[in-house]
Image (spheres, rainbow, N blue to C red):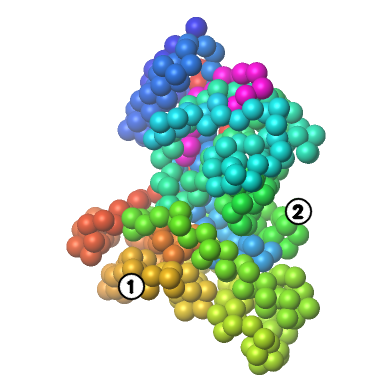
Amino acid sequence: MQTLISENQLTHPKLLKDLYGNSKKNVSYQSNRYEKLTKRFFDLYGSMPVRYFSTPGRTEISGNHTDHNHGKVIAASINLDSIACVAKANSVVKIFSEGYERPFIVDLDNLNLIDTEAGTTNALIRGIASSFDQKGFNVGGFSAYIVSDVLQGSGLSSSASIEVLIGTIFNYLYNKGRIPPEEIAKIGQYAENVYFKKPCGLMDQMACAVGGIISIDFYNPDDPVTNKINFEFEEKNYSLVFIHTGGSHINLTDDYAAIPKEMKKVAVELGKKYCAEIEYKDFLDNVGSIRNKISDRSILRGYHFFKENERVKNQINALSKNDFRKFLSLVNESGNSSFKYLQNIYSSNDPHYQPLSIALAFTEDFISQKGQGACRVHGGGFEGTIQVFLENKFMDEFINYISRVSNVFKVLNLSIRQTGTSEVIIN
């Protein structure tokens, strides 16, 4: 019979620095977290042999809304994750998730698309299982209890973390963990696009799956080029900070869908399907004529794509040369472009509500007073978080400063996690 987790069992490397950091405080916190996870599983399903899985959230470091037009990004996994306690079952997936009263139940004998499930967790589970089946991988039932500290609606990809987690469970329970993380990411994206019916690129799932800091070139989205970037922000005495403004992405699907749609209008007018297939010079030479056919916002979002895609290359180069000052300058440029040209800071449907604008304005002011640092919108935008690179010595002062701006804003001081989605071996 499986017993609950004790602190001295958390000795496997995957539970130390690579996942959570190796401080005694972290080990104690995670020990308690996994123990509660296990106890809740036993309360729901009974005592039985179980396995554990962890998938991180992600941060987009560069490349705001470039991936869905086959552009380039820099992304990284973070030290917040979704974890699951799991046992094999027959042909049914049953998942209880913290914060939800009822379980999500999917019978794997029916993997067909069910339109009425769109927008639900059941749709994601069924879509992931269907993609496994279509690709010739094995699927089977399991019982699980899941908890996550990746905040929903925060821009840290709580949904992608869960998608990749479910795919990872299928991978290890029924495919011996042989499916590469990049393939698990593609399966998660398929489920979100086709079954959940939400348009999204592949960056979120890829960063959650692969781990560490990575650059991704989506020019060929069926086989994106992923490379690790060896860089430690901590070595520069800088913190990777997020301000969660308290908003949610839940009702913003139309705002997100408009961005790739409008960028693609630029590409179509220039005889291509995606902006990555176009040189900036061709865009510049033809902008006057295509402006008569598409909206000015489409033009501006296309402009953002071309400049942001080049910026990613320059940031990869800056990090490889250890030119951190140049990197920070480019982060600020990215934020400026997202606000003015991409226009994903607030919804045009509610211009009076602008928490991201407020957070950016006052954070920029703080950074300008200190003389070093950077900030930008983080992730999809419109709601959620901004990203801040700040010297460690200013952290306490900054937290006090931003709390005066809004008592709703929550400051998250995070770090890069070097390990992507994985089974967690507990001795």
Instruction: Say which amino acid is labelled 1.
Output: His
The answer to the question of whether label 2 and label 1 lie on touching residues, with beta carbons closer than 8 A, is no
Q: Which residue corresponds to the image point at 50% horizontal and 7% vertical from the top-left? A: 1
Q: How far apart are labels 2 and 1 at the CA level? A: 40 Å
Residue 352 bears which disc, if any? 1
Residue designated by label 2: 222
Q: Which residue corresponds to the image point at 67% horizontal and 66% vertical from the top-left? A: 69
Instruction: Say which amino acid is labelled 2.
Output: Asp
Image coordinates of residue 7 in percent, x first then y, are 38, 21
Q: Residues within 10 Å of mark 1 (few under 14, many from 20)?
A: few
Q: Judge whether residue 88 is colored magenta.
A: yes
Give whichever of discs 2 and 1 has the lower sequence position: 2
Q: Where does the magenta region start and end?
A: 81-93
Q: Which residue corresponds to the image point at 42% horizontal and 34% vertical from the top-left? A: 100
Q: Judge whether residue 282 is colored magenta.
A: no
Image coordinates of residue 126 in percent, x first then y, are 64, 37
Residue 297: in sight, yes or no? yes
Q: Outermost residue, bottom direction? A: 288
Q: Would you say 414 lies left or right of 259 here? A: left
Q: Which residue corresponds to the image point at 73% horizontal and 85% vertical from the top-left? A: 282
